[in-house]
Image (cartoon, helix red, strand yellow):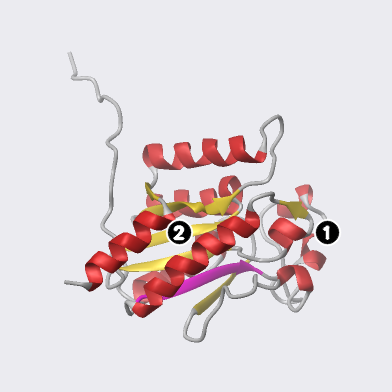
Amino acid sequence: MAEPVGRPNVVSYAIDPRSAALVGVDFQVGFGHGFEPVPHADEAVANFVAPARAWREAGGTVIHVHTTYTPERVPTGRVTDFVPGIAGALSEGSPLAAFYDGMVEEGDVLVPKTTFSAVLSSDLSGELARRGFDTAVVGGLTTPICVQTTVDALSMTGTKVCLVTDACASQPMGGLSAEEAHDAAVQRMGYLFASVATTAELVGRVAAGSRH
């Protein structure tokens, strides 16, 4: 009789700016203060900006994946079935497509995408590979949609992923509150797709690494 597989391991990937990129997903005004209400978006933004600053100071690379459309770069997949006006709302140069204040700094890498998962609709995987990164440390908006689909695909294509849990936030979803939807997504990703850390843990680990 075969041995039972057992419960998945609790994984803790190394966080090192030399081998990992810090990846922000859709930190754009429309997610939180536009067509998609996200009650804790501002907190998630602040909790990404702080480790991003430490990451840059340690010599690390910050990548911002963002949903932005032009006449040539249009929505892909079935997103317009569910959000018919998304192409206009997130058109290049629109207020809702703008990054939150303080998010992007000189030297950061901008990667446009056209649907939920950055792996399926952007060159994120190529950007990681060209820079020799085997790990992505991820935060963004919103937790169960663009963050989760990106984390899932990164993991399934071989990239190690660390999710920064308090640098993400969710909208209410179905019968779930925003907090419940966020927590469920975090638990699902941590179960089989990503290691998880808080902002404080991330900053602490980067600071500890810089002392060696």
Amino acid on which disc 2 is placed: Val
The answer to which image quadrant residue 92 occupies is bottom right
Please report the bounds of the magenta region as a residue range. 60-67
Prevailing SS of the magenta stretch: strand
Query: Which of marks 2 and 1 precedes in the sequence?
Result: 1
Pinpoint residue 15: horizontal percent, then vertical percent.
29, 61
Residue under numbered circle 1: 85
For the point 75% across and 59% down, the residue is: 33
Amino acid on which disc 1 is placed: Gly
Quick check: is 64 in the magenta stretch? yes
Pinpoint residue 105: horizontal percent, then vertical percent.
52, 81
Residue 39 or residue 88, whichever sits in front: 39
Residue 182 or residue 76, whichever sits in front: 182
Measured along the vertical axis of the image, is residue 78 above or below residue 66?
Answer: above
In this rendering, does residue 134 appear at all?
no
Measured along the vertical axis of the image, is residue 152 above or below residue 64?
Answer: above
* Secondary structure at numbered mark 2: strand
Measured along the vertical axis of the image, is residue 183 above or below residue 114?
Answer: above
- Determine crowd level at label 1: few under 14, some 14-19, many 20+ residues with C-alpha closer than 10 A: few
Residue under numbered circle 2: 138
In this rendering, does residue 154 appear at all?
yes
Q: Nearer the viewer, mark 1 or mark 2?
A: 2
Pinpoint residue 193: horizontal percent, then vertical percent.
39, 44
